[in-house]
Image: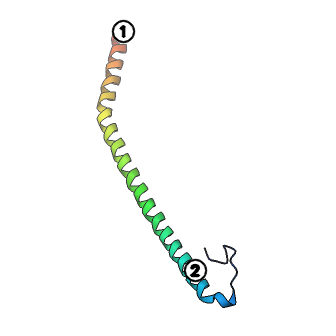
Amino acid sequence: MTLATLGWRYDVGKAETNEQLEVAVREANERLAALHHVERQSVRSALIEQRGRLCLFVCGLKPVMVGTVLYSIQALVAVE
C-alpha cells in the first residue's frame, strides 16, 4: 500500500512530510506482513497439535471399537 493507492496527493512544498509518511506506511506494511507470518505459524502449530491429539484419541479408541465389533459379530453368529 502506498500513499498514491490511498488517494494522497503530493504537494511540492511538503516533500519531506510526504517522505516521512511514505516511510511510516512502508514500516506499517512490513509490520503487518510480519504479524500475518506469525499468525500463520501459530495457526499451523495449533492445527498440528490438534491433529496429534485426534490421532492419539483414535489410537486409543480403535481397540475398543474392534472389540465391540467382534463381540457384536460373535453375538450374531451365536443367535443364528
Residue located at (64% from left, 77% from top): 3
| Secondary structure state at the residue bearing disc 2 | helix
* Foreground pick, 30 / 78: 30
The residues tagged by marks 2 and 1 sit, at their Cα atoms, a distance apart of: 83 Å
How far from the left and from the top, in percent, is residue 42?
A: 40, 57
Q: Quadrant of residue 61?
A: top left
* Foreground pick, 51 / 37: 37
Q: Is residue 64 left or right of residue 18?
A: left
Residue located at (35% from left, 18% from top): 72
How far from the left and from the top, in percent, is residue 63?
A: 29, 31
In the displayed structure, 36 sits above or below 28; it is above
Tell me the kind of residue under disc 1. Val
Q: Quadrant of the N terminus?
A: bottom right
Residue located at (61% from left, 84% from top): 18
Q: How is the image coloured?
A: rainbow
Q: Which mark is residue 46?
A: none
How far from the left and from the top, in percent, is residue 68?
A: 33, 23
Dot 2 crowding, Cα within 10 Å, few <14, some 14–19, many 20+: some
Task: List the residue tagged with mark 1.
Answer: 79
| Secondary structure state at the residue bearing disc 1 | helix
Q: Is residue 12 left or right of residue 54?
A: right
Task: List the residue tagged with mark 2.
Answer: 21
